[in-house]
Amino acid sequence: MMNKHLVFSCLFSIILFLIPKTASADIVYPARLEITEISPGVYEVYYVLPVVQGKVLKAEAILPELCQLITDRKIGGDAFIKWERWTIRCTESLHGKKIGIEGLQGSQISIILKISMINGRVYETSLSPVNAFYLVPEPPSFFNIAGPAIRDGLNILLSTGGLYFLLLILFMMKARSFNWLNLFLLSTAIAVGNFLATDQLLIIPGYMGLLIPLILAALCSIHYLHNRALPSVITHWFAIVSIGMIMGASMPVLGSSLGLTESEMMLTVLFRWVGIFAGLILAYLLIREGLHLFRYFLLDKERWLVYAVGIGSVGWLIYESSLFLIAPALLPKMILYSLILPILLGLMVNLSDRSAERTLLLFSSSSIAGLVWGLFVNLPIIVIPAIMGIVFILITLVLYKTTIRPLIWTLMVLLIGIGGGWATGYFTELNQSYAIGHGIAYWLYSTAVFILTVTLFTASGNVKQGSGISGILLTAAASGLFILFIRDSYSEDLRELIAMGKIPVPFVSILLIIAALYFWPRKRRIHEKMNMAQRTPLTSVILIAMALVCLPFLNLRMQNPISDSGLTDSGSARQILQGILSNTYESFNISDEDQLFEQLSASVDEELIDEVYLDSRRRLNAGVRLGAEVRIRNVEVLSIENIHQRSINSYEYDAEWVVIARVKHLQHIHFRRNKYLGTIQMHQVENQWKISNIELKSEDRSIVPASAS
């Protein structure tokens, strides 16, 4: 009966709430006016205007009359911007004075105004043709800080609708472990998350603070309808802190335009926490009194209220998620290791009857340590197969109902957390702007995914140790992790290697498979006569798992005796050129010059190395700011035409290829796409194809989003 009600609820929610939301974005020009106080009363002015279609807007910075020029103006620029820099002295403070731009009328340009005082106050706003002047406010008093901060805390908390659903279902389930201490922890976590988001130390989209409470509310309603039991992991203090930080970071943050000093900023954070805590208390009292009234008038209809909460949370969840159908790019960029590993651990906790709270603490604490390690320490990618080996061993032990000692379980969970955190930090630092903020967000996501997984499968009551569905779920999750592992671990494309006339022989994996077959338990006739049960193939299964983990590594590369070493067809020529160009461009990721030239010599003729090095370095760094780091991410050959055989082992053809590079400047990352068209000549030296000549005909540069790269 319960399944019918759930199906009806979902269908009703879809019909009622499937109304998509819309999204929009504005164009921003790189124009700004920066006024920085370098000594009392002395300010340095930096004024930047964009060059649009070869013209510079005739807009002039207007400063207070009490400020006098004390240095000559320095003027510079390039094809994109024009800048001016000068120094002024002001006889009075800038507080209460107007600063703006004259000449913006008729344009669509907005100018960022930033005023930095020597005492730490920073005012930042945007000047537009409609609002071209800014009045620098006076320093705030204590009451000017406390009042708005408490009001903001109340507003952002009471306007978080998903929180009401979660609190309502928790109180309806009479969760005694959810008490005033939990309210204090939740409010503190929300305030901390909001504070970290202010300085970009935690970056979470606004919708995440709504989706996670809605998902939890829906799962808790299933719990109530099934057995009126609440998984203790939801009310565990670490789960409350993690969910609270996600919600806090997704709420509106303190703006830098407030012009507060560090001490005033901390005071604002404190009073905002007071407002958040007061808002939680008000929500708590509102829900408690509302439930008292409901139970007084409808004593036996509480089950229908649970249905209403479940339908409302699922429907609101569908409504919010409809935005992703319109704009899939708004989905958070997830590191898949931080998604799959907590799902696997959550499944294994349910199957092995381990403490979810203890596993949550072990996994999350070790994950944050691994995350810090991955963000700041470069290690070989060999860490990932180590994670895979431990995960596969643990899955095997769980599925075969093997008794796992608490110490072994603890060590394995710690190692999985450290390895998964390292992989998350490594790939975040490689691909994301503000890597620290996104890395902490991924850590919180993984914690939330673990909590949701444990809650979901304890709610359904269908995942038991040894059941068929448990094997299917674990196999599916482990297969996804293995596919992800193979994708990230192969440094060379297998097809390119075969096209170049070589065969990778995984001799270690072969030896492990042979050992697995040798140790596989056999049921002999004497065992059948004595009615002895066949031993479980635990050792053999672990050896097979290790063989899969070692598959991309420790391979022998042998020459393929039946391969055709010629490049007469475009297919094989394209695959070989793909490998050679990838090796050539990726050598520029090496900081050591000797190693760089050694890798270049493997794919470029010795007479051509210097020319390729200088030309490629110049093209890759063209238009990049001084101090920026350029790293090759991907090379793809688009087409090969007009193949000409110049000699027995020498070919020439027209080729078109694309190079995508990551450009990192301070904490910002973007991706550049260089498209080349040229003629490439290759010849074979000692069974190795190398570029002997290259002539570029055209080059096209563009910026691409991270998802496209």
Image: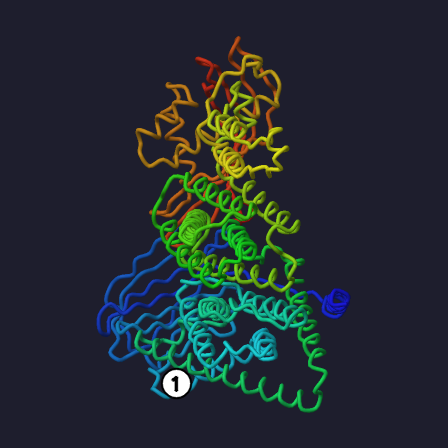
Position of residue 645 in the picture relative to residue 417 (left or right) = right
From the image, which quarter does the N terminus lie in? Answer: bottom right
Can see residue 366?
Answer: yes
Residue 318 is situated, as x and y percent measured from the top left of the image, at 67, 65
314 or 684: nearer the viewer: 314
Residue labelled with disc 1:
146
| 445 w.r.t. 642: above or below | below
- The quadrant holding residue 614 is top left
| 268 w.r.t. 82: above or below | below
Position of residue 106 in the picture relative to residue 424 (left or right) = right
Residue 650 is situated, as x and y percent measured from the top left of the image, at 51, 13
- Asked which colour scheme the image uses, the reply is rainbow
Q: Kindly state the secondary structure of the residue where label 1 is placed.
A: helix
Identify the residue shown where x is 30% and y is 77%: 263
665 or 131: nearer the viewer: 665
Residue extending furthest top? 648
| 607 w.r.t. 373: above or below | above
